[in-house]
Image: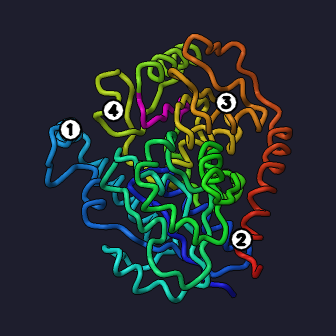
Amino acid sequence: MKKIGILTYHSGYNYGASLQAYALQTTIEKLGCDVEIINFEKDDFVASREMITRHPRRAKELIKIVTRIPFASSLSKRQNLFDHFTENTLRTTPRYDSEEKVIQNIAKYDCIVCGSDQIWNVSGKDPVSENMLFFLNFEKKQKRVAYAASFGTNVEKSTFRENEYLPWLKKFDCISVRETNAQIYLNSKGIKTEVCLDPTILLDKEEYDVICEERLIKDPYILMFGWNTNNDLIEVAKRASEYYKLPVFNIVPPPRGMFKGIRRKLDVGPKEFLSMIKYADFIVTNSFHGTAFSATYEKPFVSVVTGNPDDRMKSMLDQLGLGHRLCTKEEVDFSKIKTDDFLNVKHNKNILRSVSFDYLSRALGDE
């Protein structure tokens, strides 16, 4: 049995990061491999993800502390739920707090899989999480595969460091990325690249039900979810509340969406996030993973667009046959939102998945 090590963002107290790691781990296990996640987290990254920062260094961290103090108990539980998920649901190595420790323990793998998430985003937007280790910048000792890796939405912002990472990417045996613009960029550099689905779309709702928590809120509710909790998202959520006569719950911690008159439920880890999606009567989101899981759980939902639509989200919904769920706040009309034919959506999803499954099977095979 081949031993596979996955190197990705698998926590950060972010639902998408945690669940994409779980989905990729589960999918590779289904291919008959022994797989674990390489638990690489430096101290500064661990500190940056804290629910309430213990050692603030910037003004926005002080703002975060002040706005979160009233929710300290719920946020503490939230952090514990994420930690429990990482330690007990994901299969991980002990934590490696340096690049050197990862490299010292890498020889046991037959193959290293990098991805998914924005592991190749070195644009300078989030220097705490940027690390050239995700390009496997060390001596090659085993097969190297990238699955749905991402440079972020603007590849151009990362190219100023291409002299550092392109030589290492050329040592990969197989590369797939998450966005078409990344494929075009790497192909232009002579690096053969395919486009694959975000790992979260590779599993069905029945497979997520294995880890999904029981219902958290007894009465009917609307879920609002978006890390970018902007005014458009909030306006549509309030309109949904008025139309459906149901309360809205926001699961994103302050300072996002402050003083907007919407209830917060913050003691929500990855398993609880699945529950909040599964049992919601309606979902208002502007998040890719909020959209992806709403589609997986076949929920009535709307993805709110502000400005230009996210290419990933638009492409995914169009391919699934759910493009009409992507709307600006002006376009949202609850009276016209009907139950979709999810049998057709499942059919479309299976066609898309076949490309990704085929890629993984080839990439992890013996050729």
Rounded to the nearest angstrom, the CA distance separating label 4 from label 3 is 24 Å
| Number of other residues with Cα within 10 Å of mark 2, as a class: few under 14, some 14 to 19, many 20 or more | many
Q: Which residue is mark 2?
A: 363
Magenta span: chief secondary structure: loop
Horizontal side of residue 358 vs 97, given as left or right: right
Distance Cα–Cα, label 2 vs label 1: 43 Å
Q: Which residue is mark 4?
A: 256
For disc 3, the marked residue is: 300
Residue at mark 1: 60
350 drawn magenta: no
Do tag 2 and tag 1 residues touch (Cβ < 8 Å)?
no
How crowded pointer 3 is (Cα within 10 Å; few <14, some 14-19, many 20+) is rated as some
Q: Depth-wise, is mark 2 or mark 4 nearer the camera?
A: 2
Secondary-structure class at tag 3: loop
Residue at x-position 71% and y-position 39% = 298
In the rendered image, the quadrant that contains the N terminus is bottom right
Q: Secondary structure at mark 2?
A: helix
Nearest to N terminus: mark 3 or mark 2: 3
Residue stretch in magenta: 219-229
As drawn, the label of residue 287 is none
